[in-house]
Image (cartoon, grey):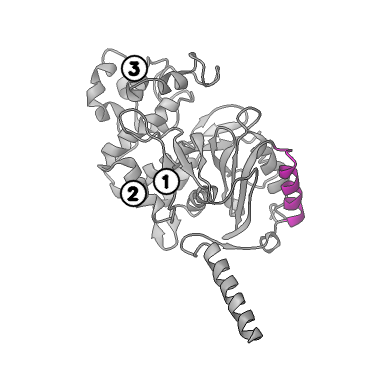
Amino acid sequence: MKSYRLWFLLAILFCACEREHPSPKAFLTYGHPAGVHIDSDKLDELNRKIHGGSFGDIHSLIILRNDRLVFENYYSNHQRSDLHPVGAATQSIVSVLTGIALAQDSTLGITDRIVDFFPEYSHLFENIPQKDQIEIRHLMSNTSGLWWDEWTHPFGSEENDAYVMSKSDDWIFAVLATPMIREPGFEFNYNSGNGILMAPVLEKLTGTELEQFAEERLFTPLNIQNWKWDRIPGGYVNTSWGLHLRPVDMAKIGYLLLKNGRWSEEIIFDESWSFGSTRSRRNVSSLFNYGYFWWRFTEYSNIVQSLRKNDVFFSWGDGGQFIFVIPHLDMVVVTTAGNHMNNDLMAMEMLRDYILSAVLDRYL
């Protein structure tokens, strides 16, 4: 009788563990860091430092390598089931959705001019040189040429254009009414308004409301079952900073990019989009370049100098929301955090000093 009870308890425990592990199609199996040539002692040290507050208010850290989930931990009372605001990393997911839309209809193109998508605002394009030359790709590379400043002054200041937009009852108008300061395509200028315009553009490209499109073409195939997407006046989803996801589902997005648009046996978007959207298109500073709503490190960044190849690309949400993808190491790293009032670059320090340095075969 005792042996039967023991067998029964073990069976319950086994089933519970099986339910906790995502199915192969939904995600990856767990693996020990040492099994994928990662120094587990280094990760243990990082884990202690996060718990000790050395990297500010970190909420989660997830590491994938070689098709294994090798590290997943939550901090400051956060849990796996919690939805987390991903901030401006929303734009990187919008970039993925753009690739899916392009794969759906070959007649679509990122060189289409946005003036054709906003007939109700056509008067805002009149008699303003170059504004009618803005293309979808200019929005995605933050080279629209629109006058915009949201980095000089903090969000909450009347001199911050993103904040002023957020207080408007028509965000689309607030962006399109902005004067031009440069011809499109030449100069990087970070502009959350560019991201906001992507919702109506993509809805008119696909003929589907964007959150529904995301659910059908991205979230459901990746088994992302829980999310929240804030909306702006007029009903569009906030395609600049409005998406909330579980960190483990952020990791799925990174893994999809790592696999060049393929999920299990399904092709979510063409592999050319993975390279085309994440490659460097504009220089931002001595440390950062920019693609289509994805960031890159320059060759001068000390984060990539320990790697044999600089192919890292990443989404970047304010406060420390990151999806790092390192193709040549077959690796994805996700962090979420609340480092809004100090330094959201702490995640990059973790990446450089602990995570990448823990990869034992990074020089091979």
Residue at image x 68%, y 64%? 35
Instruction: Determine whether, in the image, residue 87 is placed left or right of residue 312.
Output: left
> Please, which residue is most extreme toward the bottom here?
1
- Residue visible at 27% across and 12% down? 127
User: Which numbered disc covers residue 177?
Assistant: 3
Q: Which residue is mark 2?
A: 103
Q: Which residues are magenta?
A: 39-55
60 over 137 or under it: above or below: below
Q: Is residue 340 visible?
A: yes
Assign the C terminus to one quadrant of the image.
bottom right
Inspect the magenta stretch and tell me whether residue 289 lies in it. Answer: no
Residue 51 shown in magenta:
yes
N-terminal-most mark, 1 or 2:
2
Q: Looking at the magenta stretch, what is its main secondary structure?
A: helix
Quadrant in the picture for the N terminus: bottom right
The relative height of residue 19 versus residue 176 in the rendered view (above or below) is below
Q: Amino acid at mark 1?
A: Trp
Q: Is residue 254 above or below residue 85?
A: below
Q: Amino acid under label 2? A: Ala
Question: From the viewer's perspective, is 183 left or right of 333?
Answer: left
Give percent across and percent down for residue 351.
67, 43
Gap in angstroms between the C-alphas marked 1 and 3: 31 Å
Specify whether 50 is left or right of 30: right
The residue where tag 1 is placed is 273
Crowd tier of the residue under label 3, counting other residues whose Cα lies within 10 Å: few below 14, some 14–19, many 20 or above: some
Q: Position of residue 265 (x, y in %)?
A: 41, 63
- How many other residues sit within 10 Å of disc 2, few (<14), some (14-19) or many (≥20)? some
